[in-house]
Image (tube, rainbow, N blue to C red):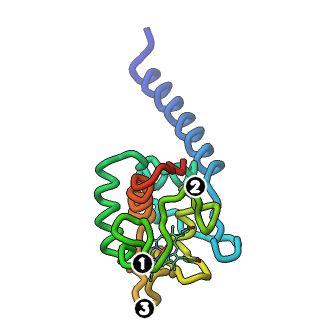
Amino acid sequence: MLGNKALKSTLLVSMLSLASVVFSAQSNAAQTFVTTQDGSPLTIPAELFDTSAAKEFLETGKNIYIGNAEAQARGHKIFNLYSCTQCHGPEAKGQVGPGLIGPTFRYDKDATNKGMFETVWHGTNGGMGAKGIGLMDATDASNGLTPDELLKVISWIRAQGGVTGN
Ligand code: HEC
């Protein structure tokens, strides 16, 4: 009969090897970001991706909040809170700034969630300031959207049109 100790250590070894597989898959798959201004590398500290949706996005570039009504409702509130409404209109269909629902975009890459994330995080050269946390307001490093908040905002924007972006 297999002793309790032996069983435990077998379990432990298999858990450890599973963890290392998961860990290496994660570190291999991490997305790299570029600015929308000129395509130069955009470094976003990994620790800011602090929810499971944000971690999944960092790994795969997919926004799992797409189609999630709760995330959309929260994203809608944040869209208002950060004055996106003032420039892009209450339904994201355009006001001073362009409409955001597609199917065509000023920046083609905004048809993907990763591209739209980069555009909002770091801004553009044409009148759209960076909204990422620590970038939005140089005097207050805590001001701005976290990755998780931005994914929720994007899920709401996507729900206003036909583009899913994933
Ligand atoms: C002060 C006005 C202003 C505010 C506030 C603002 N934007 Fe913008 N936004 C613009 C303008 C102007 C552009 C067009 C920029 C360009 O052509 O380079 C733009 C472009 C964009 C684009 C790219 C659209 C495309 O067709 O490729 C996205 C996405 C976007 N904004 C999202 C947001 C979100 C989300 C917020 C709130 C967190 C926000 N914006 C807040 C003015 C604003």
Residue 109 falls in which quadrant of the image?
bottom right
Crowd band around label 3 with a 10 angstrom C-alpha radius: few (<14), some (14–19), many (20+): few
Q: On the image, numbered disc 3 is attached to which residue?
A: 139
Q: Is residue 151 visible?
A: yes
Residue hosting label 2: 112
Q: Is residue 140 above or below residue 68?
A: below
Image vertical order of residue 139 relative to residue 88, above or below: below
10 Å crowding of disc 1: few (<14), some (14-19), many (20+): some
Camera-nearest label, 2 or 1? 1
Residue denoted by label 1: 87
Disc 3/disc 1 C-alpha distance (Å):
23 Å
Residue 137 x %, y %: 44, 86
Q: Position of residue 128 (x, y in %)?
A: 52, 80
Q: Earlier in the sequence, mark 3 or mark 1?
A: 1
Q: Is residue 57 above or below residue 142?
A: above
For disc 1, does the CB lie below 8 Å from ligand 1? yes
Mark 2 and 3 residues: CB-CB less than 8 Å, in contact? no
Per the image, label 1 sits on a secondary structure element best described as: helix
| Label 2 or label 1, whichever comes before in sequence order | 1
Question: Residue at left 44%, top 21%?
Answer: 7
Q: Which of the 4 image quarters holds residue 113?
A: bottom right
Residue in the foreground of this view, choosing between 109 and 56: 109
Q: Residue 129: x and y, percent?
A: 51, 81
The amino acid at mark 1 is Cys
Given the image, on which type of amino acid does mark 2 rest? Answer: Thr
Amino acid under disc 3:
Thr
Upstream in sequence: badge 2 or badge 3: 2
Marks 2/3: CA distance?
A: 31 Å
In space, the residues marked 2 and 1 are separated at their CA atoms by 21 Å
SS assignment at label 2: loop
Q: Is residue 124 left or right of residue 158?
A: right
80 lies left or right of 129: left
